[in-house]
Amino acid sequence: MLSLMKKQNQTPNPDINNNDQNNQSDFSGDVGENPLVTITNLINRYLKDIEKTKKDLQEKRTMFTDSYSNDSAYHEAEEKNKEITKNKNKIKEQITRSEAVSKLNNEVKDMRQELKEMEISLSDYLKRYQELTHATTFESDRGDLMEIVQTVKLVKKSKKE
C-alpha cells in the first residue's frame, strides 16, 4: 500500500494540479480551485487505482495457485490431506454431538454475539462522546489513554428499480 502511495506521489495526475502531499495537508488545490473538486478528484483516482490493483492482485493470485495444480507431488499430497481432513472432521463431529460440548459451543456463539453488540454500543457511545466534547482521546477509569478512531469506507449503492 505504501509503495502504491509513493508511486502515485511520483506520477502526476492531469486531473490534479498539486501532488498528494499538498492535497492531504490542506486540500486547497491551486488558487481559485474548489477544495471539494480537488478531494473529489483524489477520491476518484484512488478508487480507480484500488480497483486496478485488486484486479492485478487477483490475476497474480490465480497464477500463483495454478503453479501448484501443475505439480504432481503437490497433487498427491493434496489428496492425502483431503482424506486426513475428512477423517478429522468425522471425529470432530462426533465430539461436538456430545451434550456438554454442544452446550459449550452454543455458549461461545452467544458470547460472540453479545461481544459484537457491546462493541457496537461502545462505538455509538464514543461517537456521541466525541460530538459532545470534540475530543479525539478518551481516558478510561483505569487511566488508559485511548485514541478515538473512526473508519470510513465507500460501499456501492444498490440500484433499486
Image (spheres, rainbow, N blue to C red):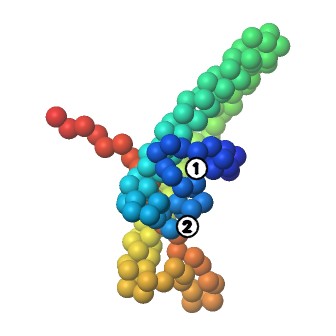
State the residue position of label 1: 101
Q: Is residue 65 above or below residue 88?
A: above
- The quadrant holding residue 91 is top right
Instruction: Quote the CA–CA distance across marks 2 and 1.
Output: 55 Å
- The quadrant holding residue 67 is top right
In the rendered image, the residue lying farthest to the front is 31
Which numbered tag is attached to residue 44? none
Residue 118 point in image, percent of width and height = 45, 69
Residue 31 point in image, percent of width and height = 44, 64
Number of marks drawn: 2
Q: Residues within 10 Å of mark 1 (few under 14, many from 20)?
A: few
State the residue position of label 2: 25
Could you say which is closer to the camera, residue 151 or residue 32?
32
89 horizontally vs 78: left or right: left
Name the residue: 83% across, 13% down. Answer: 73
Name the residue: 58% across, 35% down. Answer: 53
